[in-house]
Image: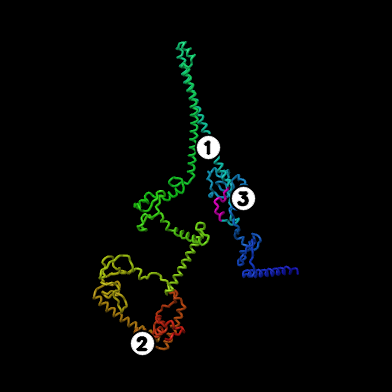
């Protein structure tokens, strides 16, 4: 009993498993037929009941789960991310990046140039370092890892968030730009102060030198005065001392002191003016540097000016110097207007010439060619739809406008074709005319020809005779006529009319050759006819049919009273009906015909009679009423 219990349990488990499998199969069929609702995944989305189990089941290494498709691809969230939500996600990523400490050494698998783990060396945008200063060799100045954020993992990206130019930009990065500018400005101010201090010291040194020179000159003058005063009498010297106004030395000394004081004041004013001039020069110098920096940062046009709308127009209308200028194409004062500022001539300067031969047809020529016409028609269609109250614009949504233009064009063509078919059916035209008759295509020409009253060509080219691809008017081997000018009824071959020769490469010998060829052709044909008649007689004896010599006896062209065998006629009628039924079923393609289908067949008078009876004459007005039961009105 103990040995039988495991076996019985296993059998019961197998039977239960089999019943569950059958039940699952029945439920799957009911779900496919719509009798039961389909399964739902963990997010509440419907699973197609026609999907097999190996698609909806999760593999064993991903854990246990119900029917789902999440393990095949990343399921996108239906929520649309706005610009603010995208900015918040980016800021979170940036803050997480700032929180991570900076690497202190080179890490395996990082960029060899800067040391970041987010890219490789070939994708590095940092300035290439030397071999000694590279991150993988020096282990210094390791750059931080870049922020890699895929917004599609968090939801669908909205229209404005997808086209945000500043997506992923950290405003804190601009502080570094401002700090750099402040550092440069401080260095510039410091440099200006140093230069100003140097100029002030140089100026003070010059003033000190001038003052010393003046004092030295003053001392020399005083020594000269004292030496002259020694030779003046004592009474005069006393009077001079008592009267200082009369004393020339005092007067000169006063003038000297006045001049020295005046020079000091003048020097002070000169210093102030020089300082102001220096400051103005410095200001102009730094303003010029700022202007140069602005020009350097701006977009330069090809001729060297600052970029802009005017420069774009100038660059667009520049011409190669070897080309003829627009204003020299027509020197008439009343011709097309030329704008020298924009270098444009909008209208055609030569309107009377052939447009295909013009090298320049005006600047507005491009508005009537290419995709400009298509864009204009699309714009007109959008305006008409806007007038009817529909919200569509060619600039805000060009793809939708292009699709509407195609649909409108297709509907317009269908409407035109239907109208054309109605008109053709109204006037009894079953098929649309394919074009001009082939016999009339070459019947018209623009070549001028003038004829006389008798039909001769007086002026211009005459009627051209149609020529074939074969050589014409060629007389080989002394022949005086072309090949194919003679036909032998007895031999049924083409030849030369000059000598009645039926050999293409024969040599012509004139009238004697004609006589010899005629006798040879008649003699040979007689023998051939006799041999052919003998062959026909033997074949008719074998088949039991009578041999007919004349063609009219078979086809009934000359005599109407021909003796026909009724049994053979009935057999020929049945044979003709079988052939007609077989031809209806068999494909008419020449490549699919049966083997020996082109075998020659002897035609008997009974076969011709059966053909005459079974064929339908299309020109007969009563042919359409053969198989119908319609009664004709009795007049």
Outermost right residue: 1
Where is mark 1, residue-wise? 188
Q: Does the magenta portion include 489?
A: no
- Span shown in magenta: 159-170
Q: Nearer the viewer, residue 341 or 469?
A: 341
Q: Secondary structure at mark 3?
A: helix
Badge 2 or badge 1: first in the primary sequence: 1
314 relative to 397 in the view: left or right: left
Q: Secondary structure at mark 1?
A: helix
Q: Nearer the viewer, mark 2 or mark 1?
A: 1
Tell me the number on the disc at residue 560. Answer: 2
**Badge 2: few (under 14), some or many (20 or more) residues near its Cα, within 10 Å?**
few
250 relative to 485 in the view: left or right: right
Tell me the number on the disc at residue 524. Answer: none
Q: Nearer the viewer, residue 281 or 617?
A: 281
Distance between mark 2 and mark 1 Cα atoms = 130 Å
Q: Is residue 599 visible?
A: yes
Tell me the number on the disc at residue 92. Answer: 3
Looking at the image, residue 126 lies above or below residue 629: above
459 relative to 177 in the view: left or right: left
Residue 334 in the image, given as x and y percentages of width and height: 35, 53
Where's the C terminus, which quadrant? bottom left
């Amino acid at each position: 009993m103990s040995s039988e219990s495991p076996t019985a349990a296993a059998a019961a488990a197998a039977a239960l498993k089999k019943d569950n499998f059958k039940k699952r199969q029945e439920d799957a069929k009911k779900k496919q037929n719509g009798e039961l609702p389909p399964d739902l995944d963990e997010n509440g989305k419907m699973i197609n009941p026609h999907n097999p189990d190996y698609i909806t089941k999760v593999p064993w290494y991903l854990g246990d789960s119900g029917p789902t498709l999440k393990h095949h691809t990343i399921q996108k969230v239906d929520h649309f991310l706005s610009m603010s939500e995208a900015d918040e996600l980016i800021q979170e990523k940036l803050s997480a990046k700032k929180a991570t400490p900076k690497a202190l050494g080179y890490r395996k698998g990082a960029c060899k140039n800067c040391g970041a783990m987010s890219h490789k060396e070939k994708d590095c945008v940092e300035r290439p370092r030397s071999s000694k200063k590279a991150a993988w060799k020096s282990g210094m100045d390791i750059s931080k890892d870049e922020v890699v954020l895929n917004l599609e993992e968090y939801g669908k990206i909205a229209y404005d968030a997808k086209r945000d130019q500043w997506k992923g930009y950290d405003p804190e990065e601009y502080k570094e730009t401002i700090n750099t500018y402040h550092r440069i400005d401080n260095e510039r101010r410091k440099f200006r102060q140093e230069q100003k201090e140097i100029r002030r010291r140089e100026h003070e040194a010059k003033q000190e030198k001038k003052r010393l020179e003046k004092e030295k000159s003053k001392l020399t003058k005083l020594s000269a005065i004292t030496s002259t005063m020694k030779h003046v009498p004592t009474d005069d010297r006393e009077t001079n001392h008592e009267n200082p106004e009369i004393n020339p030395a005092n007067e000169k000394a006063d003038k000297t002191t006045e001049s020295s004081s005046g020079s000091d004041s003048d020097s002070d004013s000169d210093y102030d003016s020089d300082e102001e001039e220096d400051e103005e020069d410095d200001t102009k110098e730094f303003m010029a540097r700022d202007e140069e920096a602005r020009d350097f940062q701006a977009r330069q046009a090809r001729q060297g000016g600052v970029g802009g709308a005017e420069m774009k127009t100038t660059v667009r209308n520049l011409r190669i110097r070897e080309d003829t200028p627009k204003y020299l194409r027509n020197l008439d004062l009343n011709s097309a207007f030329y704008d020298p500022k924009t270098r444009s001539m909008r209208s055609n300067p030569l309107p009377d010439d052939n447009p295909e031969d013009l090298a320049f047809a005006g600047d507005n020529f491009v508005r009537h060619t290419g995709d400009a016409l298509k864009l204009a028609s699309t714009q007109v269609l959008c305006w008409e739809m806007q007038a009817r109250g529909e919200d569509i614009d060619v600039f805000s949504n060009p793809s939708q406008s292009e699709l509407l233009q195609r649909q409108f064009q297709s509907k317009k063509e269908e409407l035109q074709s239907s109208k054309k078919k109605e008109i053709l059916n109204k006037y009894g035209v079953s098929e649309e005319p394919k074009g001009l008759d082939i016999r009339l295509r070459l019947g018209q020409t623009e070549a001028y020809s003038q004829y006389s009253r008798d039909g001769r060509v007086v002026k211009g080219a005459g009627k051209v005779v149609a020529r074939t691809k074969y050589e014409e008017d060629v007389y080989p081997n002394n022949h005086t006529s072309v090949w194919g000018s003679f036909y032998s009824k007895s031999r049924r071959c083409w030849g030369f009319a000059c000598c009645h020769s039926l050999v293409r490469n024969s040599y012509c010998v004139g009238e004697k050759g004609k006589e010899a060829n005629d006798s040879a052709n008649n003699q040979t044909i007689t023998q051939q006819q006799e041999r052919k008649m003998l062959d026909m007689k033997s074949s008719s004896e074998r088949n039991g049919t009578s041999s007919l010599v004349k063609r009219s006896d078979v086809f009934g062209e000359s005599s109407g009273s021909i003796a026909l065998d009724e049994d053979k006629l009935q057999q020929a009628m049945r044979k003709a009906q079988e052939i007609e039924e077989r031809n209806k079923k068999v494909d008419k393609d020449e490549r699919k015909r049966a083997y020996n289908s082109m075998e020659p067949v002897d035609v008997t008078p009974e076969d011709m009679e059966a053909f005459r009876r079974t064929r339908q004459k299309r020109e007969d007005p009563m042919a359409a009423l053969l198989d119908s039961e319609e009664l004709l009105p009795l007049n």
